[in-house]
Amino acid sequence: MRSELLKRADAFVEKYGEMAAPDYRPGYHMLPPLGWINDPNGFCRYQGKYHLYYQYFPYSPVNLKMYWGHSSSEDLVSWQYHPVALAPDQPYDEMGVFSGTAYVEGTEMTLMYTGVSVNEQGEYRQTQCIATSADGDTFVKDESNPVIPTALLPEGLKKEDFRDPKVWKHGDTFYCLTVAVDPHGFGKLLLHSSRDMISWQYVGAPLSGEGMDLGNLWECPDYFQLDGKDVIIVSTGQANPKGDKFANVNEVVYFIGHFDVENASFTVESYDQLDDGTDFYAPQTILDDKGRRVLIAWQQMWARNCPTAELGHQWTGHMTLPRILSIKEGRLWQAPVSELAAYEKETVSHEKVRVSTPQALEGVNGDQVHLSVKLEMENSWRAVISLLKTEDERVTLTYDKAASTLVLDRSHGGYPISGGEMKKGACNRAVIALEGSPETLNLNIYLDRSAIEIFCPDNGRSLSTRAFPRRMGQDISFEADGEAVVTVTTSSLKK
Ligand code: FRU
């Protein structure tokens, strides 16, 4: 039985689904027809397809009480919208159905999520709940909810910041990682275990931000094994900048190491910022049927204005391109999924063009394109690629060979974007550190209207950002101090 809240949300999307203005909407990224979205939730393979749930508020382009939206895909590029999956329709989740994950066994899918409620004293409480489904569309919330109540929080931890369960099964035991905040204000990961997903015990706290300067709030943990290592990903808030890193108000960090799950102990070997851009948060990963570790994240950031909401476009936010993860040189590398190639058309190439003053190249333009660029810098110390360009607007990507940095600047990219990190000087500037001032720089640039993603195939780093050019600029140009040699292939990704 679908609750009244679910029926109302579906009817609203059905009636107003065409209302979102098309101007800045990406075409090959996942986003629902209208409204607000944030974190990916319950990402899984189920009955032969990829399913992605997400934090969703269909009624407006700003977030209020959270629901779970739902879309599915055969290939991670074309997404089909489904009815809303979960609504805040129970006393224990009436203030919001917050983020969580999916566990699939055979035809049964179980979602584990955070229920937000307010008690009689007006205090917010977060607890972990489950809902099961036999078709991925209709869910039954369990009678035992909340299955991890605040009573299972260790002494002293805040009962209003206990959320985002990551559930998995190891042998006969289910494990659940959640985030909490300790009495000194540090983010902490908690581990609970269960035999049946209903009755849970506290095991321990495998990781804490204490002494790490990694923010005062942790959110959305993920855990997986990759290339012989254990990896934990956490989204953090308010970390102090470290050089050009951790410049956003919120940031995603990964830890590579060894997870002794039975004893709830994670030994950190290395950690780093996962994406170097301005808009990347709350990622989730799955192991897919091809044996790939696929990651998808929310391509937006908390505590910022969003031009599409301000312009009355009736939508905000979308997901990043799905990426494949690997570990190389002790670091996590990201590369966009190969399925994108099947959508590429109208390919144009230019070989070894010598560039100094700003130069456009025949057929190299558009705002829904994949650009594969090689910059050869023998006679140049600085090269600039301008994207989404008109006479007075552009997003620039500058390779500064001496500084060994690739800097994205969207401060003249269109509608102004400002946010909670302005005090750190970031928000419109993002930097990929390149080791050893390479003579040759290879880049994969994906433009999808307001979505911009840069991938460096030589070091596995990525930079995800957004821009909203007022005049919908489509031009692309190349320039260099001295003379750089540019080889570029561009393909349209317009569907
Ligand atoms: C992260 C987050 C989660 C929470 C959800 C609420 O972006 O704050 O911690 O579950 O969003 O929408």
Image (spheres, rainbow, N blue to C red):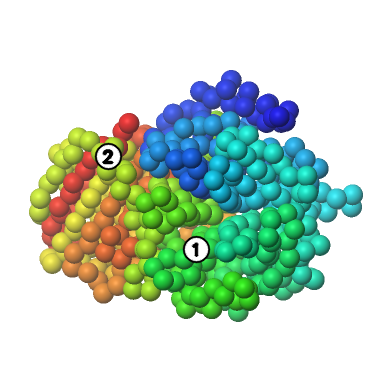
**Residue where numbered disc 1 is placed:** 224
Q: How many marks?
A: 2
Depth check: give the residue in front, 191 or 457. 191
Depth check: give the residue in front, 69 or 160. 69
Q: Is residue 303 above or below residue 237?
A: above
Which residue is situated farthest in the right direction here? 120
Residue 493 image position (x, y, % from top left) = 30, 37
**Residue where numbered disc 2 is placed:** 342
Q: For the point 46% across and 66% down, which residue is it?
A: 225
Q: For the point 42% across and 57% down, which residue is it?
A: 293
Dot 1 amino acid type: Phe
Q: Earlier in the sequence, mark 2 or mark 1?
A: 1
Q: For the point 26% across and 64% down, which residue is it?
A: 458
Q: Quadrant of residue 432?
A: bottom left
Residue 195 image position (x, y, % from top left) = 68, 60
Residue 25 image position (x, y, % from top left) = 43, 35
Depth check: give the residue in front, 360 or 88. 88
Q: Between marks 2 and 1, how big is the CA–CA gap?
A: 29 Å
Camera sees residue 87: yes
Disc 1 is placed on an element classified as: strand
Disc 2 is placed on an element classified as: helix
Camera sees residue 249: no
Dot 2 amino acid type: Ala
Q: Residues within 10 Å of mark 2 (few under 14, many from 20)?
A: few
